Amino acid sequence: MGKSKVNLYSIPKSTKQEERIGSALKLLGLDGMCSSFNKLADRMFKQHKTFYDFLESLLEKELFYKEENRQQRWIQQARFPRLKTLIDFDFSFQPKLNKRMIHEFASCRFIDKVENVIFLGPPGVGKTHLSIALGLEAIQKGYEVRFLTLSRLIESVEKTDNDAQSRHRLLGALLRPRLLILDEMDLHDTTITSSTFLFKLLQDRYEKGSIIFTSNKAFTEWGKLFDNKTRAGAIVDRILHHAITIPIEGESYRLKGKQRNSYTGFTKAA
Ligand code: ADP
Ligand code: MG
């Protein structure tokens, strides 16, 4: 049986015009207009604006509201572990890092060109921070993003328990976003199932969708994630074919402002 009762597309009966307009806008799903038309009408009237000005401003409110909602929704779907922005990133702490290049990435042209970005460096230098920040920039510009660590990816593949359908669904979900962020491409024990999945994912995204990788391991080590050498060579080759590698060699930000306590061996705030 279908829905037994739907909301009729008609202006609800109410004595107050304000309420009738509000209800109609709600019914049409124009929540941004609904929450603003009242004050906006007053302001526009006082400023002697035309009906066209009013209508345009009202439409702007709705578009702004819908755009904000889209971004919030996509940020949730991306599953970032935390939110970090480029504004939060202290470039003076990593003077060797090419700031212009990072801002070029923020333009998202690398996504249009289907290029990969690889942040390589020791722990704590900001690889994950930068990848999240670029992910947020991409969402703002209308690209769908998905973030996950390699260990989470392997875990998710193992969880599918050899069920081909759920593995296929997982693959689809990781192929769809224009930008995939694969964090911590470090060494992991992969089973044949997870290494085959990773191979397929990277092969299917090749020249179709960008990936940002972060790792503290050299590319030669990445090959060890795959069960056979030919596959390893083929996939690392594809990753590097359209990739820009950004080495980050500086100090760990986590240890910033801390000094080693030589007595206890622990670090403490300076
Ligand atoms: P990595 O992924 O390289 O191990 P993270 O990106 O996780 O390092 O950085 C560790 C912590 O230090 C995070 O909280 C991050 O926001 C912060 N951080 C790292 N580098 C910077 C920086 N240059 N400016 C501001 N915060 C930074
Ligand atoms: Mg990290």
Image (spheres, rainbow, N blue to C red):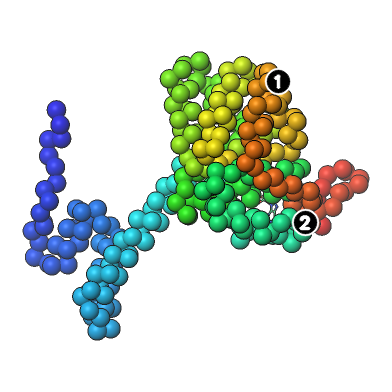
Check residue 19 in the rendering and tell me which mark sits there, or answer none: none
Comparing 79 with 210, the one in front is 210
Q: Nearer the viewer, residue 224 or 242?
A: 242
Report x, y in % for residue 238: 63, 33
Q: Identify residue type, mark 1.
A: Lys
Q: Is mark 2 within 8 Å of ligand 1?
A: no
Residue that numbered label 1 is attached to: 229
Residue drawn at x 56%, y 34% as measured from the top left: 206
Residue at (71, 20) in percent of width and height: 229
Q: What is the secondary structure assignment of the residue under circle 1? A: helix
Whole-number angstrom distance, CA of label 1 to CA of label 2: 34 Å
Near mark 2 (Cα within 10 A), the count class, few <14, some 14-19 or many ≥20, is few
- Which kind of residue does numbered mark 2 sit on? Lys
**Badge 1: residue crowd in 10 Å (few <14, some 14–19, many ≥20):** few
Q: Position of residue 256 (x, y in %)?
A: 77, 54
Image check: 237 left or right of 167?
Answer: right
Task: Give 78 or 203, whichever is nearer the viewer.
Answer: 203
**Where 30 falls versus 120 (above or below)?**
below
Q: Which residue lies under the disc numbered 2?
A: 96
- Counting from the top left corner in percent of width and height, residue 103 is at 62, 58
Q: Nearer the viewer, mark 1 or mark 2?
A: 1
